[in-house]
Image: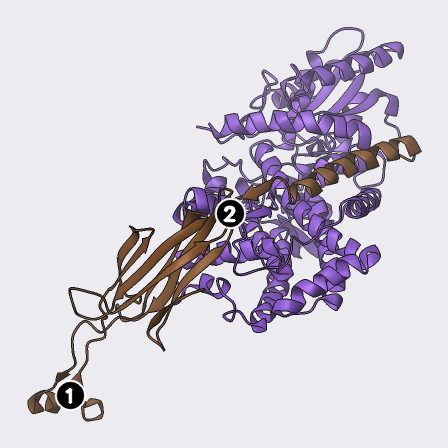
Amino acid sequence: MIGAIRSILLRGFELIERPFDRLFGPALNPVAQLGALGFFFFWIVAVSGIYLFIFFDTGIERAYESVEHLTHAYWFHAGVMRSLHRYASDLMVVMAVVHLLREFANDHYRGTRWFSWLTGVPIIWLLYTSGITGYWLVWDKLAYYVALTTSELLDYLPIFGEPIARNFISTGTLTSRFFTLMVFMHVAVPLFLLFIMWVHILRISRPRMNPPRMLAALTLIALTGVSVWKPALSQGHVDLAKAPVEIGLDWFYLPLYPLTALSGKGAVWAFLAAFSVMIGLMPWLPPLRRAKPAAVDLAHCNGCARCADDCPYEAIRMVRRSDGLPFPAEAQVNPALCVSCGICVGACPSSTPFRRSRELKTGIDLPDYPLAELRARTVAAAQALAGPARILVFACEHGGAAAWPGGVPLPCAAMAPPSLIDYVLSKKLADGVVVAGCAERACFNRLGIAWTQQRFAQQRDPYLRSRVPRDRVACVWTSILEFTRFKQEIDRFAVTIAAHAPIAGTSSPLPPAALAEPGTATPQKSGLVADRSGQP
Amino acid sequence: MTNPIRIAGQLVVIGGLFAGVAALSNRPVYRQTPPGTGIIMLSFVHSADRRAECRRLAPEEIARLAPNMRRTQDCPRERRPLYVELDVGGHTIYQASLRPTGLAGDGPSRVYERFVMPAGQYDVAVRMRDTPRSEGFDHERREHVALATDQMLVIDFRAESGEFMFH
């Protein structure tokens, strides 16, 4: 059921993201930058809020008047700032909701990612609290409606001795001190929100907190343009003798407020509680079946820290050497954070398939899909290739090539060490190699595509050696729903490869014993790669 | 990436999305009551009498108490429920026995109810019983009110003066 919903959502996002990819390119695609844009909007809200506070006056009469004054008398700066403040706040909600849906669709919420998912729940609450307290401050008709409905909702809970909504039904019960309290709330809650946003990304290596500069510039220009075109305005001064019956509602922040009149306050609280509990429990409904975490083999680890540097989940740290070998540090895996993506295996300089030893070992390896098995599968897959352009595909299980027959499956494209590509071509196992991963905008393991590209471009250790003919290596980044596009890319690459002089095929460079390792008889996905859905 | 036409296209798309967000930030308009109606709001907080009278303690009961806790009377904390009725235009639209608040039932009773009524002239009567009596009312007020469209008529009770207020 949950898998079906995810699949539908994923297809929906694909429909949106592909045209965006064409227009913006994968690096600037706004749909792939939702978290970073959320942070960006937060800073816009913070800066514009500080600016507005210079003009804002707390008080029953003065609050409204000061907001009107800054909106009309100084529309060209303070008025625009007010609109920026308002619309950036709305966009934060949009970013948060779409971000939540997208992470759900991409199955980015289970396993070790539970922490970021769970800390997202208080972010939603704090974001809404920040916005609602902000609307209160303007003290226009909308503010009156928000104040009445919010306090009626709070009064439903048995917290306050006297209904706080009574403060807003007649003159004389509301004092300016109340506005001072609301200003405090409107500053304190967003500060706490920022703190939780920081906690939210605490377990993420190299989190994207800032969108690319070009996207940030476009966003700011567009937002300023919209602010000038449609300035945020107040909805008339509050008259406590008149009910706020007709209100221009902010449907991003206040969609549940009309429900208090339609279905009752209890129903609204029940919905909010059920929604929060359901979202909070989702990482365990059902839990992700995790492969065994990466394991360090100290005999082959020289403490170079490349695995720790490349791990997208902060699952590896360097600690003092414990085995007496003359290196200062050794890698240590935190099993609770490891998702067994294999990026560390691809980063380890010991991960070289050229080793002639009987048992291929590396400094850090996946127990369920060791490098030796990867090499054996590679050789077996290569031997099954035929035709004028023998192309060996290393296929990330999350990308468009996952279903490619005869491909060598990987939990992430970056698990393939560059030396494995070198091995395939120098041992003449294939005429060309394709490393296939997820769509460039949405790497399942966050950094797998970036690290692969940088290793191949010799910008990041371990390099793809210069002797590897680059025209025989291709990277194809397609989403899991883009099998057809992947096939087109392969066909295009095959035409190029066919134009080259063929590399004479050889028999297996491996001793028969190595080929007889588990899983090599048929090049299917390993248990590690095959079942990550967690579905029973 | 640096193609000006492409950048313009990107700007148009982002601007269009933001314009949509700006439009939804105060549209469509929400109307919480039908046109031509007003609201009568009955809202007040008031403590009814205690459920039982204070009882003078017998000398032996006082003697059993700790020396620093000795008192002459035992006064139960729990209060009686407040009984309230509201008539509008000759019809009783609200009657309730309001339990006291607080875990020990010693807090004030409270009411916060809104009634959406067509605008017009009404005879309004509000009554309350806050003593042990079982018949009649301790506080009552009748008014003829003209409820205007979108008006919020608040019926409050001031414990200091012991009377209902219409405002």
Of residues B80 and B159, the one nearer the viewer is B159
Chain letter for the part of the structure drawn in brown = B
Residue B115 in view (yes/no)? yes
Residue pictured at 50% horizontal, 63% vertical = A168
Of residues A107 and B109, the one nearer the viewer is B109
Residue A118: horizontal and vertical position, in percent? 53, 48
Residue A347 in view (yes/no)? no
Q: Colour of chain A?
A: purple
Residue B36: horizontal and vertical position, in percent? 50, 44
Q: Answer with left or right where residue A336 lies relative to residue B103.
A: right
Q: Answer with left or right where residue A98 lies relative to residue A494.
A: left
Determine whether A30 is above or below A71 in the image.
Answer: above
Instruction: Give the number of marks.
Output: 2
The answer to whether marks 1 and 2 sit on the same chain is no
Of residues A246 and A233, the one nearer the viewer is A246
Q: Residue under circle 2?
A: A257
Q: Which amino acid does label 1 sit on?
A: Leu
Residue pictured at 65% horizontal, 52% vertical = A235
Q: What residue type is labelled 2?
A: Tyr
Q: Mark 2 belongs to which subunit?
A: A
Say what secondary structure mark 1 lies in.
Answer: loop
Say what secondary structure mark 2 lies in.
Answer: helix
Q: Residue under circle 1?
A: B65
Query: Do the residues bearing badges 1 and 2 touch, measured as CB atoms within 8 Å?
Result: no
